[in-house]
Image: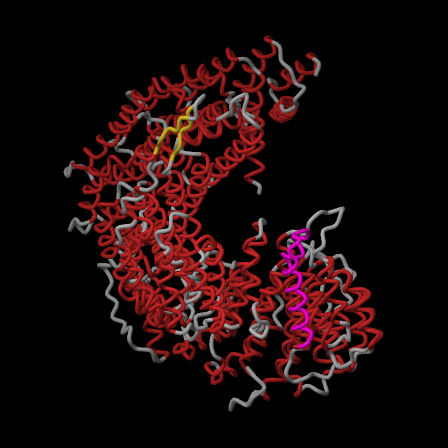
Amino acid sequence: MANLQLSGIIEKMTGKDKDYRYMATSDLLNELNKDSFKLDVDLEMRLSSIILQQLDDVAGDVSGLAVKCLAPLVKKVGEERIVEMTNKLCDKLLHGKDQHRDTASIALRTVVAQVAPSLAPSILVTLTPQMIGGISGQGMSPGIKCECLEIMCDVVQKYGSLMADDHGKLLNTLLLQLDCNQATVRKKTVTCIASLASSLSDDLLAKATVQVVKNLSNRNAKSEITRTNIQMIGAISRAVGYRFGTHLGNTVPVLINYCTSDSENYEELREYSLQALESFLLRCPRDISPYCDKILNLTLEYISYDPNFTDNMDEDTDDETPEDEEDDESANEYTDDEDASWKVRRAAAKCLAGLIVSRSEMISKVYQEACPKLIDRFKEREENVKMDVFNTFIDLLRQTGNVTKGQTDTDESRQIFCTLSLHQDGCPKWLLKQEVSKIVKSINRQLREKSVKTKVRKYEILLLVWFLFDILVTPFLLQVGAFSVLRELVVVLPDCLADHIGSLVPGIEKALNDKSSTSNLKIEALVFTKLVLESHAPPVFHPYIKALSSPVLAAVGERYYKVTAEALRVCGELVRVVRPSTQSMGFDFKPFVHPIYNAIMSRLTNQDQDQEVKECAITCMGLVISTFGDELRKELPSCLPVLVDRMGNEITRLTAVKAFSVIATSPLHIDLSCVLVHLIAELTGFLRKANRVLRQATLITMNTLVTAYGDKIGSDAYEVIVVELSSLISVSDLHMTALALELCCTLMTGKSCSENISLAVRNKVLPQALTLVKSPLLQGQALLALQGFFEALVYHANTSFYTLLDSLLSCAKPSPQSGGVPKQALYSIAQCVAVLCLAAGDQNCSSTVKMLTEILKDDSGTNTAKQHLALLSLGEIGRRKDLSAHAGIETLVIESFQSPFEEIKSAASYALGNIAVGNLPNYLPFILNQIDNQQKKQYILLHSLKEVIVRQSVDKADFQNSSVEKILALLFNHCESEEEGVRNVVAECLGKMALIEPEKLVPALKVRTTSQAAFTRATVVTAVKYSVVERPEKLDEIIFPEISSFLMLIKDGDRHVRRAAVSALSTFAHYKPNLIKGLLPELLPLLYDQTVIKKELIRTVDLGPFKHVVDDGLELRKAAFECVFTLLDSCLDQLNPSSFIIPFLKSGLEDHYDLKMLCHLILSLLADKCPSAVLAVLDSLVEPLQKTKNFKPKQDAVKQEHDRNEDMIRSALRAISSLDRISGVDYSHKFKSLMADMKRSEQLWGKYQTIRNE
């Protein structure tokens, strides 16, 4: 911009006309905001002077624009000019006219906010002394002090670390203001000291704390001064976080003393004291531990503190007359403008919530002592306090879900674990179950209230109580409107609320029918209704169907689409409840059929509505037709075409496809003749679509349609389907492949399968299947479907057995292009061969076995793949069929043990074990005898025995008593083997035997825990680890009293035994945490000790030219950290994370590469689950993370070392990302410095952002 034009603007800014001044100032602001705007020295002086002059303009809008001009001007002018403006603004603030003080204050705060960090020290030199003078100066008005305090608050927040030399003087000045008579000055002083505290040194922080505590100790001080000092304590704690922990010993007793004072005028002091204690709980979790019990008792005392009100309601009375209800409401409407006791109750509730979320190890005690009190306080008369009580109870439910996540709750496991541990240890989940009746009773009483806000929260509590039995609580469930997540998460505990349905129905009915109910309340009520309907036995609801169905069907017609969608989902559950099966249950469902159908049909035919409603209507109509089809024969010709029509719409076609799948599986055999041809044609076309989910749903629906209506579908349609299926069979999508093969099998096994269809399958699908079987990725459902496909080819498609067998065997031949067939592919081929043989009949099976044995007799050894496949095939056939008719087959297999190829030996071992499974009385003694007599082949023979035992444990089959004794004697004899591989196989065999014969194995294993041989002790502990499986077992009840005998070997003198014990503990924690929770207080210190580097386990190996350091304790430490990670996930309520983080986790962060990465994962988990514990020691964790991210390999390092270091840096960045999400992490200067250091490296910051966005 030309100087002439700028001069014109400046001239107008000084004119007499305020409109000219306003427009000129606005033009200047626009120019200053342009990046191209530049100033020379003269213009800087002129503009600075004129803008400062404009601040005093009599027109408020002009001075306001002048303040806005300061922000861009500060970025355009030099350091000298900024210092000059700062001095002038300070003078205006401190000595100027009162009417200009506010403008000067805002202008100064603008300068502080916009000045470049590099210029900040120059500004602080002149600004800080003047502000301190303004705060402490004699004769300064309270208004000036408040303005100066606000400015200093901004200064210390942004530049506190740059003004360390002034910290002492500023702190002394601020502390004196805590005794000021003006409340506004004291309030702003508290805020300023709190802002300053985060940058104070430990000594100055201690000085501030000591002074405030000293002030609190003065009982003669005015109550408002005492209140300010209590607020100051809480504000400092919130500002500095864990750094305040060292001062709790002096502070907490003083605050507790104020809380327990008998004075009736101490309500506000109690409130602020409880708020400070809440801050201590959240910010200093480690140091507050000794006071937690006292704080818990204190919160329980004051959560019901209400000296001015007596509640005489009889909580045990369920039936209330309307007059009683009115009396209750009028009683609850008691108010007293001067009654501040509600603030104490609210503070107590929040303090209790802080205790709950920060002390996971106290969750059982909280249930025993606090839960009944919280439920009782649901009757709270103040709505704000009541909401906080609800929030506290929800925090308790969330924490219960957090600490018990992953615990099994099936019927069988519940029966076992309740007798073992739930009652004995006071499991939070069990304790919660005992309170369900009280919760429902209390909330049901509250549902009659008029407050929609509290009603919504009560439904939320009911939902969370319900949901906790799936133990998958997430933070999203605690937000109103987020309950749609529940339908994906809730797995029901049967009959949890069965005894209370009758009392809940009126509340649900009122929420849906009441004209004053908001949409939000209706949605919560509908979500709750759906969850209850889907999780209880239908007969529970039959007496209440009429009461429930009317408001739900009315809600289907609501205008708000979210209410309609939820109502349709409830209708779907209502349909299942009304008619749970086609068998007569003594309940007349017919009166409800047509009302439900009509309500849904009106929504189904309406095109002008939200997509969510359309999808819910289609899904619900599918359920209605599937369940009530026999009562809707007249309506089907008009309804089914509508559903088919929805398949033509890209938005609704997926939902419609799934709806027809439900209809096709109906036991009522719904008549689809009016739409079947069109339906099959549409579905066939969908197989060519790019939408993967649609293709999967189409395959499932086609399978059900062909199964139910195959005889009504033309063969031409089948042939087109087969052609489409061939393109879907690929190793790149095994799930799709499995569905396609299953549909192909259904086509071949159907009544209408013709020669043309069989020919199409052989020509189109079989080549793809033979390609698939050679893939090493083939597994799971796809492999099972492929086996069924080959079986169906022989059974139903008139395919030559020998042709198929040759094709399969040919797949094992190595090709010049791809080389040998992968080992995993040979296992897949062998399983298909076995299924094929059994499907072809005994004669073909016998001939195939002879052919395979002939291959084994060929000792040329030129084709190892052929022999390998032959052994695997014999094993698979032998597992499914007794091969004792083929004399000497076991001897022939054993001869393959002599092969020079390891894969042949392994296959022979596998074959022998599986052949034995087919006829245990014949082959098991042979294997045991060979193990005794063939010393050189023991390892391979033990693998054969393992195959037998593992298969028996999975199939839950028993051995003969004589065989059991022989097996145990043999296994125990090999416990001391020098070969680790032998010991591992023996341990696995013993573990799986324990599942079969727990009464014999557990005592036998326990006896050997005291063996003199370390290898024996390690083997029996490892065996216990192998005995732990996810499903409930009889073994659980037998081993529970003896677990300590095995796990206490964690303090054994031999490192191999300790590692085995740690591994066993980790397995128990993962699969059966309830079995070991009672032992954790004793085990945890021993486990933590295994994470420490032991110098005695480090040795130096002399390799001649150089020496190599070997750490024999590395694997033990790795196993210990892995165990801790598992325990944090499954047994959090038994752990105190603070005692583990320092020093054990910190030590791991500085340990070996593998351990660092594992500790990064643990740190991320702790940051998510126990953020307050991590925050308390965050400064100590920053240094090892800093070293890891800055580490650089040597210049001569190989590529693998560089790759490994890169992985380690990414792992550290993930941990840093988790830490950065913790609320309050800004209190750590070291962490802020770490983040700032990362930002300075463009490459490192780019990696961090990528990881953060993953």
Residue lying at the far top in this picture: please name it. 42
Q: How many marks?
A: 0
Taking the spot 22% from the left edge, 45% from the top edge, the residue there is 290
Colour scheme of the rendered structure: secondary structure
Tell me the quadrant of the picture where the C terminus can be found.
top right
Tell me the quadrant of the picture where the N terminus can be found.
top right
Q: Is residue 1074 left or right of residue 46?
A: left
Residue closest to the eye, 243 or 843 = 843
The answer to whether residue 445 shows anywhere in this view is no
| Image position, residue 420 (x, y; %) | 30, 66
Q: Quadrant of residue 465?
A: bottom left
Magenta extent: 843-869
Q: Is residue 118 left or right of residue 901?
A: left
Q: Is residue 431 magenta?
A: no
Q: Is residue 858 magenta?
A: yes
Q: Quadrant of residue 494?
A: bottom left
Q: Is residue 474 above or below residue 1206?
A: below
Q: Is residue 647 left or right of residue 619?
A: right
Q: Is residue 1207 above or below residue 756?
A: above
Residue closest to the eye, 320 or 671 = 671
The answer to whether residue 544 shows anywhere in this view is yes
Q: Main secondary structure of the magenta part?
A: helix
Q: Is residue 106 left or right of residue 765?
A: left
Q: Quadrant of residue 368?
A: bottom left
Taking the spot 30% from the left edge, 77% from the top edge, the residue there is 317
